[in-house]
Amino acid sequence: MGGIRRPTTPGVYRPHHVLTVCDERSRGERSRAASHYLPGSAAILLRSTMSVFVSLQAIEEAADRIGGVARKTPLVPLVLEGHGRVLAKCENLQPGGAFKIRGAHNFITQLSDAERYRGVITYSSGNHGQAVALSAGVVGVKAVVVMPTNAPGIKVDGARALGAEVLFEGVTSASRKARAELVAAERGLRMVPPFDDPWIISGQGTVGLEILRECPEVSRVLVPVGGGGLLAGTATAIKLQRPDAEVIGVEPVGAAKMRDSLAAGRPVTLDHVASIADGLIPVRPGDLAFEHVRRFADDVVTVDDDAIKTAVLQLFRRGKLVVEPSGAASVAALISGTVEPVVGNDTTTVVVLSGGNIGLDLLARLAGRADRPVVG
């Protein structure tokens, strides 16, 4: 498949396997959070770190928590020649235009009254920022979003329209994270991580819950990979219930941080990233997300920008679906042949369309094949 395949025991948690994941919350907050994850020895506090995998219970509780704000998006049939039955999980139809509302709302609704009073901040290429702004507005919390200077206008305008204060910093995830941390310290704001947090991963895991509830016979699920939170949560939710189902992550060739991290056996930071899929170009996967992907996902593959462009246009022209480049990476893996067809007449592949925030100008440029990659 062009990716990294690793021996795994899907769906099995070994309490003696300790993950060391940075967690800047207070001891009390970590203790409260631990109750949402695996019980007993599975929730291990190690000095100033938390060592957990999110549990199916945590994901189910997240589903209840985000109900009424995040939508249960449909599975829509796609016609992709040679690939049998293919269903699209349409997260492009979420409020805010992307799956990010799931994790953001699960996180913000669990904050203390004092944290809500002070407000929240995040750093984002766009979709997570809009989700935080939307959730904050629902809860009645002020929100600040740090975006890259080359963020798509549709995402900047979306965050502002939802009431967020938008700041700009650099073109890499590392630079905007540093700016967000500085502003958070200056103003006393609560950071809402874009992907590397148990509450975020649990929220994103509700995508997997919905896939299995609507299509329990699913054979394979393809998931776009940015920082890894969506793949981590979706793979966990599916493998804890259907360990025989295959879960594959898809990221751009020009931002293959998860693939390279899996090959190295640890999270690595890329020196340079470039892709038209602006939501998939963090320079490093989240530590906690990486550990979940390493344990629960079957593979991570890469696709080039030409395949992503073709997928965006095919979804628009044939499927009548408006999907941004980042959201179309899963389909790009199929139409490019990076992921081979599933053998058998009774097989079903689900492709997660993670977002739909694409401007008409970019869609027109894609149709004219006159675009340039976003560089970070």
Image (cartoon, rainbow, N blue to C red):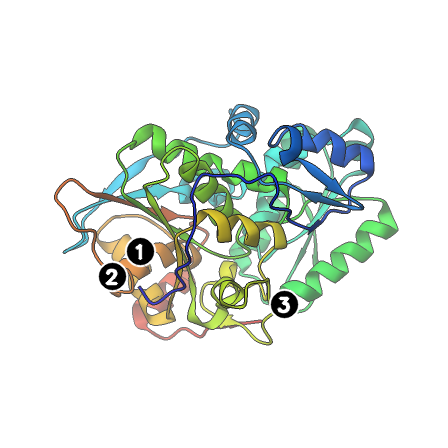
Q: Secondary structure at mark 2?
A: helix
**Can you identify the residue that label 3 sits on?**
172
Which residue is more in the foreground, 370 or 52? Answer: 52
Marked residue nearer the N-terminal end (3 or 1)? 3
Residue drawn 64% across and 66% down? Answer: 149
In this picture, residue 111 sits left or right of residue 277: right
Image quadrant containing the C terminus: bottom right
Q: Secondary structure at mark 1?
A: helix
View extreme (right): residue: 186
View extreme (left): residue: 345
* x then y, percent, for residue 202: 55, 37
- In the image, residue 305 sits, relative to residue 117, either above or below, namely below
The residues bearing labels 1 and 2 have C-alpha atoms spaced at a distance of: 6 Å
Task: Tell me, yes or no, if residue 102 can be seen here.
Answer: no
The amino acid beneath tag 3 is Thr
Q: Residues within 10 Å of mark 1 (few under 14, many from 20)?
A: many
**Can you identify the residue that label 1 sits on?**
331
The amino acid beneath tag 1 is Val
**Can you identify the residue that label 2 sits on?**
335
Task: Tell me, yes or no, if residue 65 can be seen here.
Answer: yes
Q: Which mark is residue 316?
A: none
Residue drawn 47% across and 39% down? Answer: 12
- In the image, residue 329 sits, relative to residue 213, either above or below, namely below
The amino acid beneath tag 2 is Ile
Marked residue nearer the N-terminal end (3 or 2)? 3
